[in-house]
Amino acid sequence: MTRIKCCGMTRVEDALLAAELGVDAIGVVLTAHSKRQVSLAQARAIVQAMPPFVATVALCMDDEANFVQEIIDTVRPSMLQFHGSESDEWCKQFGQPYLKAIAMGEGAAALYQLHDHPHAAGLLLDGHGLGEPGGSGKSFDWSLMPRDLKQPLILAGGLNAANVAAAIGVAKPWAVDVSSGIESAPGVKGHGKMREFVAAVRAV
């Protein structure tokens, strides 16, 4: 079964619908690099609204360590996600499970990064370029998804209800991560699009 993460949540009602649809995780973006950034208070409200067994992920990108610690203390997410140039040593200092995003905008040249974070709970391969935030809606060559890594791989970038089945067929990821592909505006999830996306994944 392919797991589903719906990221870039800015409204409690959108996150609640994701939970009702049976998604495995929701994500909130705290970094100022993103147009989907929410405040600590907004993120906490979304996380606290989640029912049991729905993981909550807080996304950062080259943020200061004291801010990441404030996220942990205030929002209390299940997991952190780092989208910048953070090293494995830097990410693991917080003692929290974390995902590391790999910017696949360079194509095959980006694959060398896959072995740089041995302590990551999973690696998220996204279609954006190096130094760019996630949620860009850009896809990459799904056939580049490796099959020989021990860490779970999460496919992101340009996914929507129309192409996610094909993407899963090619990449065979542990999970898929969607943000812009289920939006009516940046950070505002279209409930019909969300339902269609989850149904398309479940049908594979």
Image (cartoon, rainbow, N blue to C red):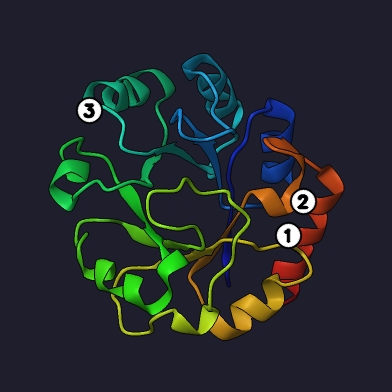
Say which quarter of the image contains residue 196: bottom right
- Residue 87 is labelled as none
Give the x, y percent position of residue 121.
31, 57
The image position of residue 172, as x and y in percent, is: 52, 80
Which residue is under mark 3?
Answer: 65
At label 1, counting other C-alpha atoms closer than 10 Å, the crowd grade (few under 14, some 14-19, many 20 or more) is: many
Q: Is residue 21 visible?
A: no
Q: Which residue is mark 2?
A: 194
Q: Looking at the picture, tell me which residue is in the foreground, 78 or 110.
A: 110
Quadrant of the frame with the N terminus: bottom right
Asked whether disc 2 touches disc 1, contact meaning CB atoms under 8 Å apart, the reply is yes
Find the distance from the CA under tag 2 to the CA under tag 1.
6 Å
Residue at mark 2 to residue at mark 3: CA–CA distance: 33 Å
Determine if residue 98 is in view.
yes
First along the sequence among labels 2 and 3: 3
157 lies left or right of 202:
left
